[in-house]
Amino acid sequence: MTEDLFRHDSYLTSCEATVTGVLDDGAIILDRTVFYPTGGGQPGDSGVLTLAGGETLQIQTTVKGTDGGEILHIPAADQALQVKVGDSITCQIDWETRYKHMRFHTALHLLSVAVPFPVTGGQVSDKDARLDFMLPDPDFTKESLTETLMGLIEQDHEVSTRWITDEELDAQPDLVKTMSVQPPRGSGKVRLVAIGDVDLQPCGGSHVRKTSEIGAVVVAKIENKGKQNRRIRIRFAD
Ligand SMILES: [Zn+2]
């Protein structure tokens, strides 16, 4: 089981760790990590592992292992350096990319407030982010939705997390907005992300501390995805 430091502090950019496993395909398991593994519509982190001697290994992405609690750091191709179990390393994420993921991820939670319809899917990247809604007939335009979203961002709500048990979540099914992304279960508790008093939903992803950190975003596209569905894509304004 990898200790998931990023789940408790999304602003950690590096940590010391020990290699606890190296799989046949080269994937590296650490005892603790700041690398977020792909999940919940947020890409896995890239970054670098540095050995005590200063040699470095580029990590292309991070995914969850099939064993649940393990996090796999996937090295970029064509690197000679091998790490082995017991090695002490420093792991450091590509913060510039991750911070964009965080800004977009929090922005998508606010988009689900601005568009109060069931969410059927979503994806964050460092270029843009989207949510799919079950929404037959939007009563807004790109421009008016941008205005609503920016209004929420500029209210500068605090973003916080807290944990509830699986049973508490089962008792409040309306907390789950995203039908396609079920909150991670199995550990007996689920993390909730609260944005001021405007939004509360289960989410394991990385978020900014205050909505003002999102900065200026625009609704770039509202696409038809069938009669019942609309895909709404946002970008940073700059
Ligand atoms: Zn989320």
Image (cartoon, grey):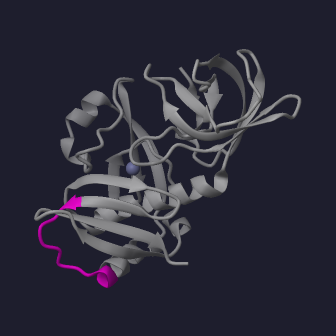
In the picture, measured across the screen, residue 111 lies left or right of residue 153, that is left
Task: Kindly identify the residue that appears in the image at 63 percent across and 27 percent down.
Answer: 32
Q: Is residue 226 visible?
A: yes
What is the magenta range?
133-144
Q: Is residue 208 visible?
A: no
Residue 21 sits above or below residue 36 on the image: above
Residue 201, percent across and down? 33, 48
In the picture, measured across the screen, residue 147 lies left or right of residue 87, that is left
Task: Kindly identify the residue that appears in the image at 31 percent across and 59 percent down.
Answer: 131
In the picture, measured across the screen, residue 211 lies left or right of residue 34, that is left
Residue 222, percent across and down? 28, 73
Find the residue positioned furthest to the right. Answer: 53
Between 88 and 25, the one nearer to me in the picture = 25
Task: Kindly identify the residue that appears in the image at 50 percent across and 53 percent down.
Answer: 207
Specify the quadrant of the image occupied by residue 47: top right
Specify the quadrant of the image occupied by residue 162: top left
Residue 30, percent across and down? 64, 24
Residue 215 sits above or below residue 165 on the image: below
Number of numbered discs visible in the structure rendering? 0
Residue 37, percent across and down? 51, 37
Find the residue positioned furthest to the front. Answer: 78
Specify the quadrant of the image occupied by residue 56: top right
In the picture, measured across the screen, residue 161 lies left or right of residue 228, that is right
Residue 102 part of the magenta segment: no
Task: Kindly identify the residue that appears in the image at 29 percent across and 29 percent down.
Answer: 166
Residue 142 part of the magenta segment: yes
Residue 164 sits above or below residue 230 on the image: above
Residue 84 sits above or below residue 38 on the image: above
